[in-house]
Amino acid sequence: MHWIADYWWIFLVILVGIILNGIKELRRLDHKRFLNNKPELPPHRDNNAQWDDEEDWPKKK
């Protein structure tokens, strides 16, 4: 583990490079075009729809 104390700056350079590449890729993203062309999602179907017809909450009088 002594080599980490000697070469800590290499880890720092790699981490900064990863962060900068992430920022560059996020700047290239065109969110308006994606939102205009996004596919329609199918309607959500509850897995409990077949047997969960009764109300779970107690009825108020």
Image (cartoon, helix red, strand yellow):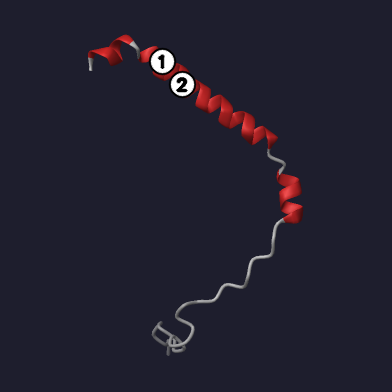
* Residue toward you, 52 or 37: 37
Quadrant, the N terminus: top left
Is the C-beta separation of discs 2 and 1 under 8 Å?
Answer: yes
Residue type for callout 1: Ile
The residue carrying mark 1 is 10
Q: Does residue 45 lie above or below 13 as drawn?
A: below
**Secondary structure under badge 2?**
helix
Task: Give the CA distance from mark 2 to mark 1.
Answer: 6 Å
Q: Does residue 36 lie above or below 29 as drawn?
A: below
Q: In this view, does 49 lie to the left or right of 38?
A: left
Q: Residue at coordinates 69% horizontally, 65% vertically from top-left? A: 40
Q: Which mark identifies residue 44?
A: none
Q: Position of residue 18 (x, y in %)?
A: 51, 27
Classify mark 2: residues with Cα within 10 Å, few (<14), some (14-19) or many (20+): few
* Residue toward you, 55 or 23: 23
Q: Does residue 46 lie above or below 12 as drawn?
A: below
The residue carrying mark 2 is 14
* Residue toward you, 60 or 30: 30
Question: How many numbered circles are shown?
Answer: 2
Q: Position of residue 27 (x, y in %)?
A: 67, 33
Q: Does residue 44 lie above or below 4 as drawn?
A: below
Residue type for callout 2: Ile
**Secondary structure under badge 1?**
helix
Q: Residue at coordinates 34% horizontally, 12% vertically from top-left? A: 7
Q: Which residue lies furthest to the left in this view?
A: 1
Classify mark 1: residues with Cα within 10 Å, few (<14), some (14-19) or many (20+): few
Q: Residue furthest top?
A: 6
